[in-house]
Image: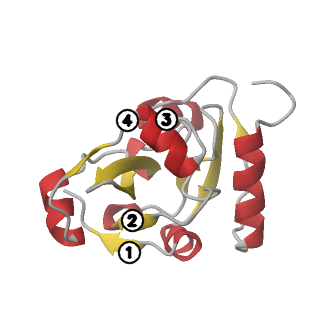
Amino acid sequence: MPEKLHPSVIKVSDALRESGATGEVVVLTEPAPTAAAAAAQLGCEVGAIANSLVFDADGEPLLVLTSGAHRVDTALIARLVGAAKVKRASPDFVKAATGQAIGGVAPVGHPAPIRTLVDTWLAKHEVVWAAAGHVHTIFPTTYDELLRVTGGTPTEVE
């Protein structure tokens, strides 16, 4: 990662500061495109990593912040949000909705608000780590703070 922060990371950092979030963006030495990779670098449980997964819910973006220990049940999520179909979004769809590339999508800092579901399992962890707009960046937060800064809905995702 270059010493100068990626524009997406600056947007995320600004959004965190504006929302009153307490964590600071951390630049990792190695990329962390998966929860397992992030947990290995941080020395924490994979379940404490908040994966930012973008789905296409009947053509609308849906962000699911799920514990790295979970898989998202898309049929369940479709029923919960009233969508006919919820599917993993394409890289182009993710980039258009979030302004960020897959592997580094943050819960905040998007061009427009995105409907967000937050995995209730994350509440089991005192510190939750989420991507900060680039595959080399992450920030510490809490379950309650994630709900507040994203306007997310607490949800059992699997």
Q: Which of the 4 image quadrants contains residue 8?
A: top right
Task: Tell me the amino acid under the disc marked 4.
Answer: Ser
- Circle 4/circle 1 CB separation < 8 Å: no
Say what secondary structure mark 4 lies in.
Answer: loop
Depth check, mark 4 against mark 2: the one in front is: 4
Query: Residue 147 in the image: x percent, y percent?
Result: 49, 73
Q: Earlier in the sequence, mark 3 or mark 2?
A: 3
Query: Residue 27 in the image: x percent, y percent?
Result: 73, 36
Q: How far is disc 4 from disc 1 in space, using C-alphas?
A: 23 Å
Q: Identify the image quadrant of the N terminus.
A: top right
Relative height, residue 22 to residue 37 (above, below)? below
On residue 153, which mark appears? 1
In this orientation, which residue lies closer to the viewer: 96 or 26? 96
Say what secondary structure mark 1 lies in.
Answer: strand
Dot 3 corresponds to which residue? 102
Task: Tell me the amino acid under the disc marked 3.
Answer: Ile
Residue at point 32%, 62% (across, down): 121
Q: Which of the 4 image quadrants contains residue 28?
A: top right
Q: How far is disc 4 from disc 3 in space, using C-alphas?
A: 9 Å
Task: Tell me the amino acid under the disc marked 2.
Answer: Val
Dot 4 corresponds to which residue? 90
Dot 2 corresponds to which residue? 118
Disc 1: CA contacts within 10 A as few (<14), some (14-19) or many (>=20): some
Residue at point 19%, 56% (across, down): 158
